[in-house]
Amino acid sequence: MDKSEIAIFISLGSLLVSLGGLIFSIHSSRKARRIERARVYDKVYHDASDLLVYNYKKKIEEPYRSNDKFLEKAVNDFENAHWLEQMYGFNIYYPEGVESEEKKRDYRKKVSDEYYKHQHEKHVDSFAETMKKRSPVFNLENQEYAERFNRLVDHVTHNLSYFSPPVVECWEKMRLLTPEKVRNEYISLRRVNESACEPVEEPIEDPYLGILLIIRHEYRELNKPLKTKWAELWFNISATRYRIRRIFNKKRQWDV
């Protein structure tokens, strides 16, 4: 092996070492950015998630109210009781005149019926109601809500380069659309639906709601376990194979 060949091998070795160092540097840089990006998202995820269910959470935490204070206390005690107590009976204060076992049994049934009626109103009726007003444009007059939302927007503003293009797009649109304008569009659409023969599903551009939904979704994607990612990848591969197989089977049937 002459000197020129040795020089070539040395040059190739140096090139490989340099490429290895470059690849490692790129990998380390991307890994550090992913970690920093997850840290940035972590600071706004909890606010985004809580603000999306802010009204609903307040509704389901409301206690039972009634003009009959004995019934009100009994229903709230029933709600706080363990499910075994709810099923097999619990100690309550009975109003005057409820002394016989039959009347006590009827009163306990009344308490149970009122409790389940209240639960239905909280978890079913209030869910539909609060979902219509979960956009921040309906809640910014609430001081606590406004403080948390403004804190989230400020964090996005100061770390804009770490957020995805959809988040940045919502952030930019918020500079152009005021909460009052977006809220008026919602109200106008509801008025139309009240008098329309069938529901009008007109999409409303709402970057205030969009930024919360996107942040919540992207944080979950960033922190998705590897096992879940592999399961989703395998599902997508299997689904693609199934679709291709169906296409070829249909083609064979037509050929026959």
Image (cartoon, rainbow, N blue to C red):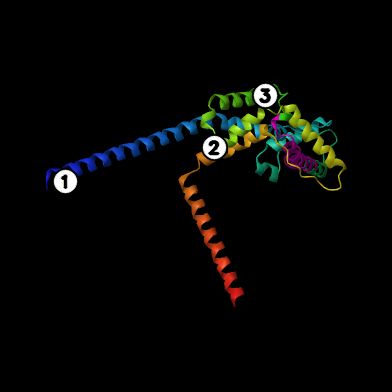
Residue 190, position as x, y percentages in the image: 81, 38
N-term-proximal mark, 2 vs 3: 3
Residue 231 circle label: none
Question: For this view, does 164 lie left or right of residue 76?
Answer: left
Camera-side residue of 11 and 36: 11
Q: Nearer the viewer, residue 200 or 20?
A: 20
Range of residues picked out in magenta: 110-136
Asked whether residue 92 is in view, the answer is no
* Horizontal and vertical percent position of residue 255: 59, 75
- Residue 197 x/y as whole percent: 86, 47
Tell me the quarter of the image containing the C terminus. Answer: bottom right
Taking the magenta stretch, the answer to whether it contains residue 248 is no
Q: Amino acid at mark 3?
A: Ala
Q: Circle 1 sits on which residue?
A: 5
Q: Main secondary structure of the magenta part?
A: helix
Amino acid carrying label 2: it is: Tyr
Specify whether 88 is left or right of 3: right
Q: Which mark is residue 219?
A: 2
1 to 17, vertically: above or below: below
| Residue at x-position 63% and y-position 34% | 212
Tell me the residue that label 3 is attached to: 146
